[in-house]
Amino acid sequence: MLLEVRDLHVEFHTRDGVAKAVNGVNYSVDAGETLAVLGESGSGKSVTAQAVMGILDIPPGKISAGEILFQGQDLLKLKEEERRKVRGAKMAMIFQDALSSLNPVISVGDQLGEMFQVHKGMSRKDSKAKAIELMDRVRIPAAKERVGQYPHQFSGGMRQRIMIAMALALEPELIIADEPTTALDVTVQAQVMDLLAELQRELNMGLILITHDLGVVADVADKIAVMYAGRIVEQAPVHEIYKAPAHPYTRGLLDSIPRLDQKGQELYAIKGLPPNLLAIPPGCAFNPRCPMAQDVCRTDEPPLYDVTESPVPRASACHFWKECLHG
Amino acid sequence: MAEAILEVRDLHKHYPLTRGIVFKKHVGAVKAVDGVDFDLAAGETLGIVGESGCGKSTVAKMLVNLERPTSGTIRYKGEDITTMSPKALKAVRRNIQMVFQDPYTSLNPRMTVGDIIGEPYEIHPEVAPKGDRRRKVQDLLDVVGLNPEYINRYPHQFSGGQRQRIGIARGLALQPEIIVADEPVSALDVSVQAQVVNLLDSLQSEFSLSYVFIAHDLSIVRHISDRVGVMYLGRIVEIGTDAQIYDHPTHPYTQALLSAVPVPDPEARAHRERIILTGDVPSPANIPSGCRFRTRCWKAQERCTLEVPLLAVPAVFRLTDSPAKHDSACHFAEEKQVVPPEEPEEP
Amino acid sequence: MPEPEPFEPLESYGEEGRAIASTGAGGASDLATAEAETLEQRPSVDAAEEAAGGPEGAGPDKKARSLWSDAWHDLRRNPVFIISGLIILFLVVISIWPSLIASGDPLDCDLSKAQEGSQPGHPFGFNGQGCDVYTRTVYGARTSVSVGVLATLGVAILGSILGGLAGFFGGAWDGFLSRITDVFFAIPVVLGGLVLLSVVTSSTVWPVIGFMVLLGWPQISRIARGSVITAKQHDYVQAARALGASNSRMMLRHITPNAVAPVIVVATIALGTYISLEATLSYLGVGLKPPTVSWGIDISSASPYIRNAPHMLLWPAGALAITVLAFIMLGDAVRDALDPKLR
């Protein structure tokens, strides 16, 4: 296994108390595999990724329990110096907002080349050649001419390609993409997503795709982990989850998306609001919004049940997963 | 079609590009909106979709008179609002209201919810007598699904979805006939989007509103719209009923846009053809000659460089009865099904 | 500045009756940045406040309140405001009636007692001219406070009106004003003071105040212009315009309250610098002139003797420092109170 997150807990200490952003997350990614982590804002999906990357702000954040095993080694036990060597070289991250992730006063060629100068000790000239090669690789037209241009001279889609190029520079084994296409237009979204998927196959990398968009996920993911209030509530291979969700939250999300091929009269809407992380409801965190909730949901927190029915494993944190899956 | 309450004709908005501070020299223009025509019938919802930079938000701003058009007319019940006196305009404004995209910046953080929703009455005191306003504001809160007791709270005490409801309540206060909604749900979480879309839907029938619904998300537009216009680089390239546009698109851009929408169903994806456009949208300061889509179009020929296609029913469909018979600005319009036909929903 | 921790209505809308609080981002910026994908930030519940149902308006209340009454409500319970307010009140009172706490005459000096230290009846000792330092410090408050306050008021009013209008209307007026501001910025303050004030013969405080306003307004004007431009771009201003609001309504109701905070902060900081500028100008002989009593004059005249008789310098300088600090603290408290996001 390339990456394994075990029982991760992350807290934020705020003036109002402790916000439990991540409460016991388990997931794993293998080389060449794409895991999509799906959730709304505040679900803890980005915090988990930041903990894996080691870019969580500590304090106010605090990893209170858990392990992050990367190629069998617990990253949380590494010294910051060793951790930094892993970051960039072995795992890299792509952010949503490419414009603010790139330095506006340094040319893209220099920003790409810097990776090689710092990590590989290459000369300026060699690193520039590498930068052009990378830009070619992410299909930026006329890479040679554009290598000296600045981020604002590129369109949104092109900037996101540069971010991808940067992440790929040192051929990492794991890429974490945090909403990589959310800021892009639909026609460009497809281009960027395809590019990412293709490069991943080519380099046999593990990819963690963090998103709120079930549509994007359906096209590229192998398996999906749905997060709610800092926990994984359902984990399944991509085909099965769309066919028959085993958690009412996943079902609600799927039903509330307006679909291109269906013009319904009223959209299904999950009632209420996502939970306050300072006061997560007792029992199942989703119970106040859940149409299936019973008394047991208000008192007992459901474990992540094994709900495997086909050869591939899947899991759901719902007391009534059977009813959800079959009815 | 029912009588049009809003007629937009040949609307242009050009922003001049200048150089120099003291002696300004015109070096060109950003053609944000470059000839837009459409009608809005009473009680209908017109969706306008397009990518960022296509000019859809500028159209919205001109409809509510936040921007003055460079040329063209916007007739509200026959009267051109672009040339009205400020006084007459103020009266018209009552009837055309706007809901903004970002619920975090569209509410004044220093005003209470009561002040925000009540402000329309202060500007148009004839709508509600003073003693009546507080009750009216509370009624509005109730209508949009918020607790009327929240009247003294500040916007930051609410979540994004709740704030958007406040913005909608403000838009409703003057009992307008038309609401222009500029990406009203794109800043919200998926599960909250549905709540707000449903609210807009139910308000439409309750208050017999007409909507101009602007969005980049084609699925939401289909859900809420009766008719849809697709914009590209400052112009509408195809317009028709939702079935015409979604099930029988004839313009290549519409087809590409539809095929690029991710469908949350890995099975459906298998039998979908995807058209992936190459390149980026050209700059509105430098619009290609002829058909503006030709630089990214797989059908482009020499004619497309020379001749501007007009927004009209293409000749091939003019004599047919097919749903493809709707306005489409393409020399080589042909029908292509990109969205798979509706399947019964899973059990 | 930490982001606010607002509270959230506990009852959620919709059909269900159960209380669901929304999340977000407690210490909101922290989690908000953490959840970088945050398409929607939600305020968090201030659980304690909500439970206590404090009078601060957590529970529904019937009386409509304005921004300013809310701000006043906040200020009254802020110890920083109370302390700085009391100091300033005290300063204002002794500026108007110095005889309340000082029975002597600041100009009644006895050279034979020059530089002497503390004595019964003369707790602060005597200065180089043999005048009573205590009496002079008390009487000095009047000039220093009035120069500082009046100059700041003048600068703030002139600067924010000119800058605010430039920011709101833009265009040629803005360009013209910006160039004027540049010209004034180019004038060195001390040199300008030497040139302009040396031709003035009046011995009142007005020429000094006028000079400070003349050279000070561009600073505030720039701040005001910038913050008006920022505020103007917010959608809520557009929303008001779409409702048909007049320019004056947008300016007063929507832009000013959201643009005034930086002006207040800069102005209170400037207040301290004006008080010390007055001292500088007085030292150079172009500001206030004896027999006017001012901390600035006393500090300058005591500075050569700091080794032998530090008390001559420390008392007026201490008074100056406390005054400046009090005004800055006041400005800070007012700024916080005017920002409902911090409640």
Image (cartoon, coloured by chain):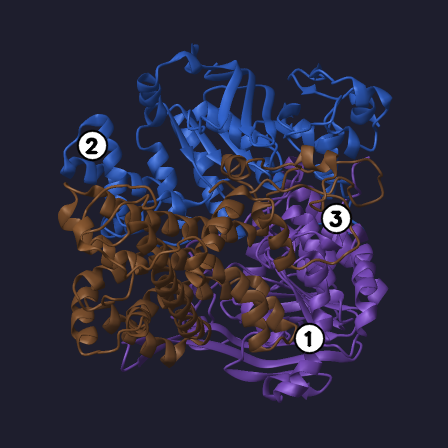
Chain colours: A blue, B purple, C brown
Label 3, secondary structure: give it.
helix
Residue that appears at 46% across and 42% down = C1
Whether residue A115 is situated above or below residue A97 in the rendered picture: above
Observer-nearest of C199 and B31: C199
- Can you name the residue that lies furthest to the top here? A72
**Quadrant where the N terminus of chain B lies?**
bottom right
The amino acid sitting under disc 1 is Ile
- Labels 1 and 3 in the same subunit: yes
Q: Are marks 1 and 3 in contact (CB under 8 Å)?
A: no
Residues under labels 1 and 3: Cα distance? 30 Å
What's the mark number on residue B195? Answer: 3
Residue at image mark 1: B123
Observer-nearest of B246 and C16: C16
Q: Position of residue C25 (x, y in %)?
A: 58, 37
- Please tell me how many numbered marks the rendered image carries: 3
Residue at image mark 2: A117
The amino acid sitting under disc 2 is Gln
Label 2, secondary structure: give it.
helix
Locate residue A152 relative to residue B72 in the image: left or right: left
The amino acid sitting under disc 3 is Gln
Observer-nearest of A308 and A181: A181
Is residue B139 in view? Answer: yes
Q: Position of residue A52 (x, y in %)?
A: 46, 23
Label 1, secondary structure: give it.
helix
Q: Where is residue C339 in the image (x, y as percent from the top left)?
A: 55, 52
Q: The disc numbered 1 marks a residue on which chain? A: B
Observer-nearest of B171 and B295: B171
Residue that appears at 19% across and 69% down = C286
Q: The disc numbered 3 marks a residue on which chain? A: B
Q: Residues within 10 Å of mark 3 (few under 14, many from 20)?
A: many
Residues under labels 1 and 2: Cα distance? 62 Å
